[in-house]
């Protein structure tokens, strides 16, 4: 118990001798772990976006040729019977041309004089809000109707994010590797400087018969404070920002999932291990000298 007290006393002495150096090292560890947590959320975000690829709730179903009224009613009924569908509206070619002019706005003159007959008739299908995530499956089923030539919908920005899943994943792995190397290097340099500043004190303690674990335990604990402490601060920072975003923008509540307990433990344990590794390397170099 007395030895543990003196080890903690030596730890406090080392931190107070280099307050700015210790603070900068802690900030560097905090920043590195922030990158790690952000990588997790980026990969999680793109993964969730893959499940919600269709961000629009409206499909345009284009028909092949001009269909008789009975055929149009049959198509309308088949689409309306789908559980995901909220409403079906027929859009004849002339109305479709009017909509096109409205969408083009000032550039509406580009379609001036266009014959409506060159445009296909269509159905505008709106989905129930609870089924917008399954828009791709609904479009595929509607496309199997014989008289349907094409089905289109706007995937929105989440669709583009979903396509970036693998690039984000591989880029995230690169960021994690850089974080691992930088975290170990920062702690290694900090502990090395700390040992150099207390070299004479360590030599005196060694001559008095102090054992290796007594001499080097303060540095291992110091490294653990940097790694695990910085990780805890990073988790509080990023998760706090996530909660604020979810409160201000509700859609982020589904896309930015909170980290699970075991993931938080991993985020704290990994930097702690890396900091201990950096401290161990610094101690090994010091003893070899």
Image (tube, rainbow, N blue to C red):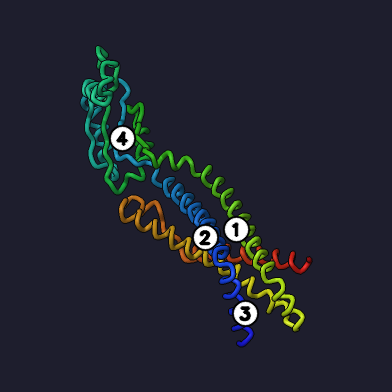
Q: Which residue is mark 3?
A: 7
Q: In this rendering, would 244 be left or right of 263?
A: left
Q: Which residue is mark 1?
A: 183
- Along the viewing direction, whichever of 257 and 123 lies nearer the viewer: 257
Q: Is residue 278 something one can see in this rendering? A: yes
From the image, state whether disc 3 or disc 1 is nearer to you.
3
State the residue lying farthest toward the bottom.
2
Label 3 residue SS: helix
Q: In this rendering, would 113 be left or right of 190?
A: left
- Along the viewing direction, whichever of 278 and 66 lies nearer the viewer: 278
Residue lying at 72% horizontally and 82% vertically, measured from the top left: 210
Residue lying at 71% horizontally and 71% vertically, measured from the top left: 199
From the image, state whether disc 2 or disc 1 is nearer to you.
2
Residue lying at 43% horizontally and 60% vertically, measured from the top left: 237
- Contact? badges 3 and 2 (CB < 8 Å): no
Labels 2 and 1: the sequence-earlier one:
2
Mark 2 neighbour class, 10 Å CA radius: few under 14, some 14 to 19, many 20 or more: some
Labels 3 and 1: the sequence-earlier one:
3
Residue lying at 39% horizontally and 46% vertically, measured from the top left: 52
Labels 2 and 4: the sequence-earlier one:
2
Q: Which residue is mark 2?
A: 27
Determine the CA span between mark 2 and mark 1: 11 Å
Location of residue 26 by image quarter = bottom right
């Amino acid at each position: 118990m007395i030895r543990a007290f003196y080890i903690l006393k030596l730890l406090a002495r080392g931190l107070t001798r280099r307050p700015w150096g210790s603070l900068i090292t802690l900030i560097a560890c905090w920043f590195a772990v922030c990158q790690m947590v952000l990588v997790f959320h980026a990969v999680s975000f793109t993964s969730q976006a893959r499940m919600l690829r269709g961000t629009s709730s409206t499909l345009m179903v284009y028909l092949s040729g001009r269909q008789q009224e009975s055929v149009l009613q049959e198509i309308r009924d088949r689409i309306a019977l789908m559980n995901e569908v909220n409403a079906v509206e027929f859009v004849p070619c002339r109305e479709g041309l009017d909509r096109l002019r409205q969408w083009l706005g000032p550039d509406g003159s580009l379609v001036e004089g266009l014959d409506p007959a060159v445009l296909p008739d269509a159905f505008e299908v709106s989905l129930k809000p609870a089924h917008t995530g399954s828009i791709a499956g609904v479009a595929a089923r509607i496309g199997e109707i014989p008289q349907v030539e094409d089905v289109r919908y706007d995937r929105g920005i989440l669709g583009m994010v979903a396509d970036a899943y693998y690039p984000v994943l591989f880029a995230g792995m690169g960021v994690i590797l850089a974080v691992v190397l930088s975290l170990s290097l920062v702690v290694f340099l900090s502990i090395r400087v700390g040992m150099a500043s207390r070299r004479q004190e360590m030599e005196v303690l060694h001559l008095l018969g102090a054992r290796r674990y007594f001499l080097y335990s303060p540095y291992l604990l110091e490294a653990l404070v940097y790694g695990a402490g910085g990780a805890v601060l990073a988790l509080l920072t990023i998760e706090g920002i996530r909660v604020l975003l979810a409160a201000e923008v509700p859609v982020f509540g589904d896309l930015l999932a909170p980290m699970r307990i075991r993931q938080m433990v991993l985020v704290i344990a990994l930097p702690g291990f890396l900091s201990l590794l950096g401290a161990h390397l610094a101690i090994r170099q010091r003893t070899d000298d």
